[in-house]
């Protein structure tokens, strides 16, 4: 599908996604705001999804197209597993997502880009890994941490300052949520924690035991601790 020449579409956009590796795997987190121009289109959109048992994907860009791409990605991974009786390697999953993004290039050239962040636990290598993409489907492995979306510059700066090689899983969760807080502090398209409405980031962790979405009460406890600390030191 292509748009008529010169036409534009006002569609909700999602940002910001962060991922952090630690000794036992990888953590991914996403804020909950979708914007349409200067309007908040949705306050509680979900941007981080399970891809399969050992991987997750976070969406940035045109929300509708991105969510549809994730659904198709999930189905393809499940279909492969049923046909082959085994899961695709993490490299294979990352490559397949790359091809799907490349297929969206005509829409991206018209302003409807989808740029996800993919992460998972590599069973063969016994470690968490992170992959980023560009709109042409270019795939790049990131090390230690990464962020995509409109608030990614601020989130990545926060991650760079606070990341350590000896992070525990709990530390990685705290770091990811803290980076989203910093992104929301400087980027209007990134939603900060909404204590009034009890809207908190989506956080997923992937380890050798598989993928798990952190319960909302656990994320709320992390958020509330960060907000309390920021009351004393707003800059973090």
Image (cartoon, grey):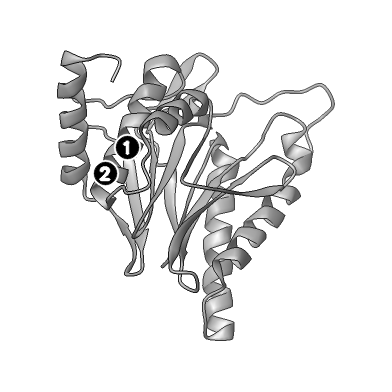
Residue located at (71% from left, 47% from top): 138
Question: Relative to residue 136, is residue 95 drawn left or right?
Answer: left
Q: In the rendered image, is residue 129 in sight?
A: yes
Q: How many labels does the image show?
A: 2
State which quadrant residue 107 falls in.
top right
Residue 40, image x, y percentages: 43, 20
Residue 202, image x, y percentages: 33, 42
Which quadrant would the C terminus be assigned to in this image? top left
Which quadrant would the N terminus be assigned to in this image? top right
Under circle 1, the secondary element is helix
Label 1 belongs to which residue? 175
- Label 2 CA crowd tier, 10 Å (few <14, some 14–19, many 20+): some
| Disc marking residue 92 | none
Residue 112 in the image: above or below residue 35: below
Question: Relative to residue 39, is residue 111 drawn left or right?
Answer: right
Residue located at (58% from left, 28% from top): 11
Residue 106, image x, y percentages: 79, 40
Under circle 2, the secondary element is helix
Q: Distance between the residues labelled 1 and 2?
A: 6 Å
Most extreme residue toward the front, as rendered? Answer: 165
Q: Are marks 1 and 2 in contact (CB under 8 Å)?
A: yes
Residue 109, image x, y percentages: 77, 33
Q: Foreground residue, 96 or 122? A: 122
Question: Relative to residue 209, is residue 114 drawn left or right?
Answer: right
Q: In the rendered image, is residue 1 in sight?
A: no
Residue 217 in the image: above or below residue 126: above
Q: Foreground residue, 57 or 35? A: 57
Label 2 belongs to which residue? 171
């Amino acid at each position: 599908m292509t748009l008529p020449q010169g036409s534009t579409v006002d569609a909700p956009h999602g940002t910001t996604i962060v991922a952090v590796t630690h000794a036992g795997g990888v953590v991914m987190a996403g804020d909950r705001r979708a914007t349409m121009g200067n309007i908040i289109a949705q306050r509680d959109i979900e941007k981080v999804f399970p891809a399969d048992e050992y991987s997750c994907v976070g969406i940035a860009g045109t929300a509708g197209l991105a969510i549809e791409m994730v659904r198709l990605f999930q189905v393809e991974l499940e279909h492969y597993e049923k046909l082959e009786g085994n899961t695709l390697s993490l490299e294979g999953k990352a490559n397949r997502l790359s091809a799907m993004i490349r297929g969206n290039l005509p829409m991206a050239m018209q302003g409807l880009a989808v740029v996800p962040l993919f992460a998972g636990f590599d069973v063969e290598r016994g470690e968490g890994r992170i992959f980023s993409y560009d709109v042409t489907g270019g795939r790049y492995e990131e090390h230690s941490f990464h962020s995509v979306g409109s608030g990614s510059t601020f989130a990545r700066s926060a991650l760079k300052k606070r990341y350590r090689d000896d992070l525990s899983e709990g530390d990685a969760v705290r770091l990811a949520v803290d980076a989203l807080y910093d992104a929301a502090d400087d980027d209007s398209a990134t939603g900060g924690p909404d204590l009034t409405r009890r809207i908190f980031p989506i956080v997923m962790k992937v380890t050798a035991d598989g993928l798990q979405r952190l319960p909302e009460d656990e994320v709320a406890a992390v958020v509330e601790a960060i907000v309390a600390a920021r009351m004393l030191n707003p800059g973090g």
